Image: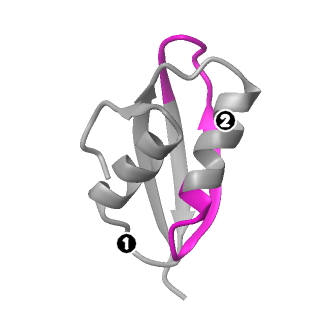
Amino acid sequence: MTHFKTTVHVDGMTCGHCIAAVSEELEAIEGVEEVSVDLNAGGISEVTIDSDRKLKHEAISEAVAEAGYLVVDNQA
């Protein structure tokens, strides 16, 4: 089985609630298996998404925006 890992940088996350909100929205994308966050409170956090398919950057950005945050790069 093919496995993909996508990392994006997200601005403005500050706490566990932020992590939960972003993770919930990203896990709703079809194919997402796991989300992990390296929190840099108030700065740019690194969000890594493991999936069984290549994800579209637009889908990731939209999910993060639904949680109230902003993807600040195009590394998807």
Question: As shown in the figure, which amino acid type bears the numbered disc 2?
Answer: Ile
Q: Is residue 60 above or below residue 37?
A: below
Callout 1 crowding tier (Cα within 10 Å): few <14, some 14–19, many ≥20: some
**Quarter occupied by residue 42:** top right
Numbered disc in front, either 2 or 1: 2
What's the residue at 43%, 55% (across, down)? 6
Q: Give percent across and percent down for residue 17.
A: 73, 30
Number of numbered tags placed on the structure image = 2
What's the residue at 65%, 52% (across, down)? 24
Real-space Cα separation, disc 2 to disc 1, in angstroms: 22 Å
Q: Secondary structure at mark 1?
A: loop
Q: Is residue 28 above or below residue 26?
A: below
Seen from this angle, which residue lies furthest top?
42
Q: Quadrant of the N terminus?
A: bottom right
The circle on residue 70 is none
What's the residue at 58%, 42% (across, down)? 22
Q: Give percent across and percent down for residue 62.
A: 37, 51
Q: Can residue 53 be found in the magenta stretch?
A: no
Q: Give percent across and percent down for residue 52.
A: 52, 78
Q: Which residue is mark 1?
A: 54
The answer to whether 55 appears left or right of 3 in the picture is left
Q: Which residue is mark 2?
A: 19
Q: Where does the magenta region start and end?
A: 26-45
What's the residue at 56%, 23% (across, down)? 13
Q: Give percent across and percent down for residue 34.
A: 65, 60
